[in-house]
């Protein structure tokens, strides 16, 4: 760990030079670099870290002012130049298929490809997440169809830039917030979808679908195995995390008591595990059990935190609802090293994100490694060096002048030290209305690690103000940074600010 | 005899004019299309977006005239080049001009569309525009007629009040896509389909603008129009509920549409 700490310190280091002569040489070099680099470059060097931030709305959609929120991202591990993404973006032509965002140049430029069945003319799909198989080049998506209510479709395409609509593999009714993860093992893609099954008996709604090779679906597994005595369901966020060894974790909120205050649920934060790709017909996700009473209850699934208060269905942070926010990530080179982040707190004053870690496969957990007050949309990822990335969005200031900050923290030493990149900060003034659009940022964002690089996506206020992007930004849509205005396709007509998806990549060139 | 052959020839010409090579009727072409334009083929095996690999099926077409384009975000593409994915490769040559019926594919630094059919251009593009507009009206009427056929009750009237639904209905489901059910009380002026003996009825509608409910019609006091109503089984609502709903965007029409609805209702 000492070594990790050392490398983290290097990561954060501000250059310090032993003598003035050397310093002058470096200053000269930096000045030359500054001349060579364009002032509006989207790539910003911080130490040896390159940060890229790109507004993803295409140039030909410059006139739009929708709430393109709740974004998700898939980077093709076999070819990281190929990246797909999603948000609440409808087909610009109002056709039958909703679009995904596609990039074939590593995220520098984006286009919409309308290939997802079931377009809602205002929002595209409802909830959507997507991933590539790790070696297959196949893109998978789990969606709530835009042309139906609570209908899950799991989809695939062999060519994500093709005009051919994605093929449906699985369809379920009465599903909320499908969240997909995929991995390729021995030439076969294994796809897992966590979701809330709204028809589950006794309200044990937390479910993982396991169409193991994405062609022969097995029965879904209800992973909340404790008897429910109160509350008619669990929270909607169910997050799987896959390790190539066959270990699969899933994290979820288990509501244990409803309504001590309006819209507040007593909640346990639970992690389950399976060590064989969740392939067995019985006993899937029971590898992790609590100790017998009085230490635990002997049941499958470890309660990492108990009786937390989670607000649901109410605006808690600024104009944003924050109920049911959870993320889990497993170290790609150590299946027992797993990080968990979630949000809880009954009201704005107490709501915070928490990060904990397990080094024994989820059996025991650390105390809080990080506590971020007034923040939401946590997303964790661990890169090939074991470095942990933690993406979140934090509300600052006091109403009516509050702002959303999007942070990416990285650590090599379990957050004893960490670097913090603020990718974006902007006023909490767009994407909501009094007609109950209460999730201007969406219910999630996404952080991924592909080899040593972190890739991510978040939604935020699209005002073209350089001060809002500490590490620079590249817009595809027409904007005028001088007047801080968005412009339509004609590059003249002013467009109202709104919520857009932003892609980012953080590349660390140094070896551990 | 010659007159007979001439009539057969003219009949064939009419058929050829209203059906493309794949056999789709003009209305079917219009129904499947979002972007209709007269254009000249400028490049074969080419594309205007970097995300698209050029193949024998992709061509670049200069838009000479826009016949029909989606509103709002789609701007005037006249004079611009777009990528067209042909239904059948090798069926066009550079310099040829057609009316392309297309649907959405890709939009980035340029746009790419997928061909659903093409016809020879008419001498005056305004003729094509008029025919497309007429076909759109027919298609819209057909869709409304299907919705009318499925409706249990069709009434014209006025919203006399809106209010939150009773708490067990309003909060019947716990979801991030909470519909937040409200009630609209409709004072009935006329019944166009079905039977109801009361002077008013209550329509349940989602007040939420969550993505799942944003497209569903919302009602406000004083609003006048025609409702296409049904009793739908919705998760979170009691299975025996007696509420009428109008959840599809085609389920509510402003007052000026009543003659059209009377014409289409069966």
Image: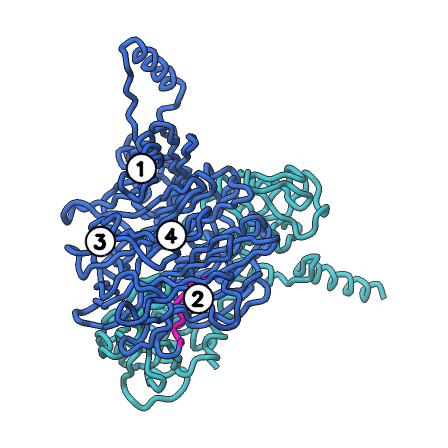
Chain colours: A blue, B cyan
Q: Which mark is residue A338?
A: 4
Mark 1 neighbour density, 10 Å: few (under 14) some (14–19) many (20 or more) = many
Count of labels shown? Answer: 4
Q: Give the range drawn in magenta.
A: A193-200
- Which residue reaches farthest bottom? B197
Label 4 and label 1: CA atoms lie apart by 38 Å
Tell me where residue A21 appears, x and y as whole percent. Answer: 30, 8
Q: How far apart are labels 3 and 1 at the CA level?
A: 29 Å
Horizontal side, residue A18 vs residue A262: left or right: right
Chain of the residue under label 2: A
Nearer to us of marks 3 and 2 is 2
Circle number at residue A352? 3
Question: Which one is closest to the eye, mark 3 or mark 1?
Answer: 3
In three-dimensional space, the C-alpha distance between marks 4 and 2, rounded to whole angstroms, equals 16 Å
- Do the residues under discs 4 and 3 have CB atoms within 8 angstroms? no
The answer to whether the residues at label 3 and label 1 have Cβ atoms under 8 Å apart is no
Is most of the magenta stretch helix, strand or loop? strand
To which chain does the residue with label 4 belong?
Answer: A
Of marks 2 and 1, the one in the foreground: 2
Q: Do labels 4 and 1 share a chain?
A: yes
Q: Earlier in the sequence, mark 4 or mark 1?
A: 4
At horizontal 25% and vertical 42% (from top left) the residue drawn is: A426
The location of residue A193, given as percent across then percent down, is 46, 62
Q: Using the image as rendered, state which of residue A103 and residue B253 is in the foreground.
A: A103
């Amino acid at each position: 760990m000492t070594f990790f700490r050392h490398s983290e310190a290097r990561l954060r280091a501000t250059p310090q030079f032993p003598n003035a002569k050397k310093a002058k040489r470096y200053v000269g070099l930096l000045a030359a670099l500054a001349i060579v680099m364009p002032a509006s470059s989207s790539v910003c060097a911080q130490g040896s870290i390159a940060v890229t931030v790109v507004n993803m709305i295409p140039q030909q959609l410059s006139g739009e002012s929708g709430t393109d929120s709740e974004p998700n991202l898939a980077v093709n591990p076999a070819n990281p130049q190929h990246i797909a993404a999603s948000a609440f973006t409808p087909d610009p032509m109002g056709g039958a298929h909703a679009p995904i965002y596609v990039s074939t140049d590593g995220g520098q430029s984006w286009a919409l490809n309308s290939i997802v069945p079931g377009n809602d003319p205002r929002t595209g799909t409802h909830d959507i997440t997507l991933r590539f198989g790790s070696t297959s080049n196949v893109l998978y998506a789990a969606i709530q169809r835009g042309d139906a209510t609570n209908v899950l479709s799991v989809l695939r395409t062999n060519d994500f830039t093709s005009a051919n609509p994605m093929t449906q593999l699985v369809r379920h009714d009465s599903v909320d917030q499908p969240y997909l993860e995929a991995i390729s093992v021995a030439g076969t893609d294994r796809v897992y979808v966590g979701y809330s099954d709204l028809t589950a008996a006794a309200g044990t709604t937390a479910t993982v679908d396991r169409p193991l090779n994405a062609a022969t679906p097995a029965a879904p597994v209800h992973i909340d195995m404790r008897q429910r005595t109160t509350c008619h369901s669990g929270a909607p966020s169910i997050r799987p995390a896959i390790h190539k060894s066959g270990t699969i974790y899933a994290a979820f909120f288990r509501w244990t008591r409803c309504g001590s205050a309006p819209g507040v649920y007593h909640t346990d934060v639970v992690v389950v595990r399976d060590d064989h790709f969740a392939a067995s017909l019985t006993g899937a996700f029971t590898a992790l059990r609590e100790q017998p009473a009085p230490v635990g209850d002997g049941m499958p699934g470890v309660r990492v935190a108990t009786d937390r208060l989670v607000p649901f269905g109410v605006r808690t942070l600024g104009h944003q609802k924050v109920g049911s926010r959870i993320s889990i990530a497993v170290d790609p080179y150590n299946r027992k090293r797993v990080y968990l982040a979630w949000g809880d707190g009954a009201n704005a004053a107490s709501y915070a994100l928490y990060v904990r870690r397990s080094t024994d496969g989820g059996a025991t957990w650390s105390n809080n490694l990080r506590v971020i007050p007034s923040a939401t949309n946590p997303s964790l990822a661990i890169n090939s060096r074991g470095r942990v990335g933690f993406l979140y969005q934090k509300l600052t200031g006091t109403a009516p002048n509050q702002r959303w900050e999007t942070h990416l923290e990285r650590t090599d030493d379990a957050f004893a030290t960490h670097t913090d990149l603020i990718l974006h900060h902007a006023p909490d003034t767009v994407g909501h209305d009094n007609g109950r659009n209460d999730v201007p940022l969406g219910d999630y964002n996404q952080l991924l690690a592909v080899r040593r690089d972190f890739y991510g996506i978040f939604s935020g206020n699209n005002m073209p103000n350089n001060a809002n992007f500490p590490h620079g930004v590249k817009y595809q849509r027409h904007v005028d940074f001088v007047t801080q205005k968005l412009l339509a396709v004609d590059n003249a007509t002013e467009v109202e600010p709104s919520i857009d998806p932003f892609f980012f990549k953080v590349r660390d060139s140094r070896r551990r | 005899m010659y007159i007979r052959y001439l009539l057969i020839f003219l009949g064939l010409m009419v058929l050829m004019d209203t059906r493309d090579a794949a056999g789709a009727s003009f209305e079917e072409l219009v129904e499947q299309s979002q972007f209709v334009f007269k254009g000249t083929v400028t490049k074969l095996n080419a594309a205007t977006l970097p995300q698209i690999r050029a193949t024998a099926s992709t061509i670049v077409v200069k838009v000479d005239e826009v016949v029909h384009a989606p509103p709002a975000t789609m701007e005037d593409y006249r004079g611009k080049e777009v990528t067209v994915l042909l239904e059948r490769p090798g069926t066009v040559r550079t310099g040829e001009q057609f009316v392309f019926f297309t649907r959405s594919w890709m939009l980035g630094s340029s746009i790419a569309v997928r061909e659903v059919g093409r016809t020879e251009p008419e001498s005056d593009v305004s003729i094509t525009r008029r025919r497309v507009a007429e076909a759109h009206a027919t298609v819209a009427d057909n869709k409304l007629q299907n919705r009318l056929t499925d409706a249990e009750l069709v009434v014209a009237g006025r919203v006399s009040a809106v209010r939150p639904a009773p708490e067990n209905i309003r909060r019947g489901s716990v979801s991030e896509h909470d519909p937040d059910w409200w009630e609209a009380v409709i004072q009935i002026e006329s019944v166009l389909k079905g039977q109801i003996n009361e002077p008013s009825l209550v329509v349940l509608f989602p007040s939420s603008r969550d993505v799942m409910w944003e497209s569903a019609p919302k009602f406000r006091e004083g609003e006048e129009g025609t409702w296409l109503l049904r009793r739908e089984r919705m998760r979170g609502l009691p299975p025996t509920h007696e509420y009428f709903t109008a959840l599809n965007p085609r389920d509510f029409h402003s007052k000026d549409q009543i003659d059209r609805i009377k014409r289409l209702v069966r």
